[in-house]
């Protein structure tokens, strides 16, 4: 049997501790399946004295991730520190410059510096694996990077943030407000004390940027993503969607068009009987559409210690099974030097239409004015419904509009025109509707 694969782990939080536990408990199985033993020989974390429920007494301790990356006698550096800069970025660069293989779960780092790190890895003949960075335990990176070789991918989309999916699910099924669901998510550990990164869509955007590069062979372009979170979704939106036969999900969508690549993250209404509408709670789902395979939909746990550790371990096992001199799969699917410049797609018609919720003063002429603003922007309405607003007694009404396919720019102009009218009460709500056959 080959020499043991020596692993150093930076970060012993929930994922790191789970990873250590799994490797220690399944040492014999891993040695058999990988053809060599996997041994954790070095670790680092913020607090050396914390009880993590694992035995690290015989493992060499380093004070910082950077020190571990530069000095430890290891073959693989596992980065579980997090963050786009600082210790995470410095230690990963140091490890790659040494020619060490690297495994990371850090989507923020990859979204910011993935191409640079891929170039270093490829120059040094090192592997840079990051399955756990997107959708937790779902092997979407391996699918795009290896399994779908030869396919031309046209679209990647999905539910990529468990916090948001949990909140939207609870709002619908229990009739709770966004604020109440967020508090419950924080109590259960599904949301951070500062949840902004998740609920404002940034976490999904980082993951989408990585998938876009893998799917389309372009430079990572996290700053080119249209971004909208779920903080403005109300229980009234949830109920209106249900009445219309939809559920609201936060989707990340990347697709190839004739004019370039379109990337967007936003709340989306999806048909209630679609597969993706049935993905509830903290579960993630990623769909890949390609010319040969058609549609591949993967559903599974998107976060949590064991789910993420499983993906990290899978990456380590791939390294253990690899042999020196073997042909390496490019880090980002395409060699870093050959990645095409990112070209943002021109605005095009959105086939699914839009949901627009307006709270308006209850007076004559409002319907006619709204219809006129829509007509001025060439927007065709599929339906228009008026309902009483229980929060404002008889002084206001809620109007729900559903449009046919139209341009986003047209919708925004029409809504701005309506906002200038004296009858509008509060802010309008605009949500895309996705109705492709494959949802």
Image: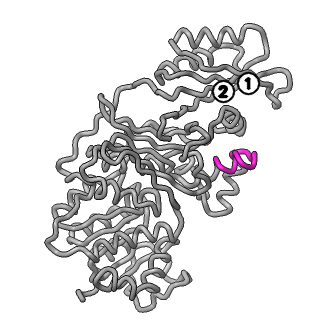
Verify CB contact (< 8 Å) between mark 1 and mark 2: yes
- The vertical placement of 375 against 147, above or below, is above
Q: Residues within 10 Å of mark 2 (few under 14, many from 20)?
A: many
For label 1, the residue is: 398
What range of the chain is rendered magenta? 168-178
Among the two numbered marks 1 and 2 on one chain, the one whose residue lies closer to the N terminus? 2
Residue 357 appears at what percent x and percent y? Answer: 66, 26
Residue at the image point whose x is 73% and y is 45% from the top: 177
The residue carrying mark 2 is: 357
In 3D space, how far apart are the residues under numbered discs 1 and 2 (Cα atoms)? 7 Å
Residue 326, image quadrant: bottom left
Residue 155 position by quadrant: top left
Q: Nearer the viewer, residue 387 or 63?
A: 387
Looking at the magenta stretch, what is its main secondary structure? helix
Residue at the location (27% across, 44% down)?
218
Residue 100 colored magenta? no
Give the position of the N terminus as an image quadrant. Answer: bottom left
């Amino acid at each position: 049997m080959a020499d043991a694969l020596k692993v150093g782990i930076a970060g012993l939080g929930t994922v790191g501790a789970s990873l250590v536990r799994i490797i220690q408990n399944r040492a014999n199985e891993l040695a058999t399946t990988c053809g060599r033993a996997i041994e954790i020989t070095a670790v680092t974390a913020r607090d050396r004295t914390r009880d993590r429920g694992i035995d690290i007494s015989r493992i060499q301790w380093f004070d910082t991730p950077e020190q571990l990356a530069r000095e430890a006698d290891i073959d693989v550096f596992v980065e579980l520190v997090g963050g786009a800069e600082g210790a995470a970025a410095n230690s990963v660069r140091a490890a790659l410059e040494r020619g060490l293989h690297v495994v990371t779960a850090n989507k923020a780092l990859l979204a910011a510096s993935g191409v640079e790190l891929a170039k270093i890895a490829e120059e040094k003949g090192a592997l840079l694996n990051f399955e756990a960075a997107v959708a937790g335990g779902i092997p979407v990176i391996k699918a795009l990077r290896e399994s779908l070789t030869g396919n031309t991918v046209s679209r990647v989309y999905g539910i990529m943030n468990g916090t948001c999916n949990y909140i939207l699910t609870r709002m619908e099924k229990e009739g709770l407000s966004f604020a109440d669901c967020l508090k419950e998510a924080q109590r259960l550990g599904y949301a951070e004390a500062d949840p902004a990164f998740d609920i404002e869509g940034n976490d999904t955007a980082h993951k989408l940027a990585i998938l876009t590069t893998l799917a389309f062979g372009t430079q990572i372009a996290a700053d080119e993503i249209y971004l909208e979170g779920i903080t403005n979704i109300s229980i009234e939106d949830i109920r209106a969607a249900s009445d219309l036969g939809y559920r609201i999900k936060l989707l990340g969508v990347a697709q190839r068009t004739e004019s370039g690549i379109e990337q967007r993250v936003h709340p989306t209404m999806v048909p209630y009987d679609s597969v993706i509408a049935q993905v509830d709670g903290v579960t993630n789902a990623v769909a890949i559409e390609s010319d040969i395979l058609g549609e591949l939909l993967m559903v599974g746990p998107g976060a949590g210690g064991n789910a993420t550790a499983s993906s990290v371990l899978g990456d380590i096992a791939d390294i253990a099974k690899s042999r020196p001199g073997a042909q390496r799969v490019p880090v980002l699917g395409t060699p870093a030097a050959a990645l095409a410049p990112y070209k943002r797609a021109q605005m095009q018609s959105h086939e699914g239409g839009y949901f627009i919720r307006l709270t308006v003063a209850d007076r004559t002429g409002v319907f006619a004015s709204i219809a006129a603003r829509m007509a001025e922007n060439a927007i065709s309405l599929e339906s228009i419904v008026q309902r009483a607003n229980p929060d404002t007694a008889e002084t206001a009404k809620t109007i729900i509009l559903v449009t046919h396919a139209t341009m986003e720019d047209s919708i925004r102009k029409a809504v701005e025109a309506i906002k200038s009218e004296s009858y509008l009460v509060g802010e309008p709500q605009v949500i895309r509707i996705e109705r492709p056959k494959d949802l």
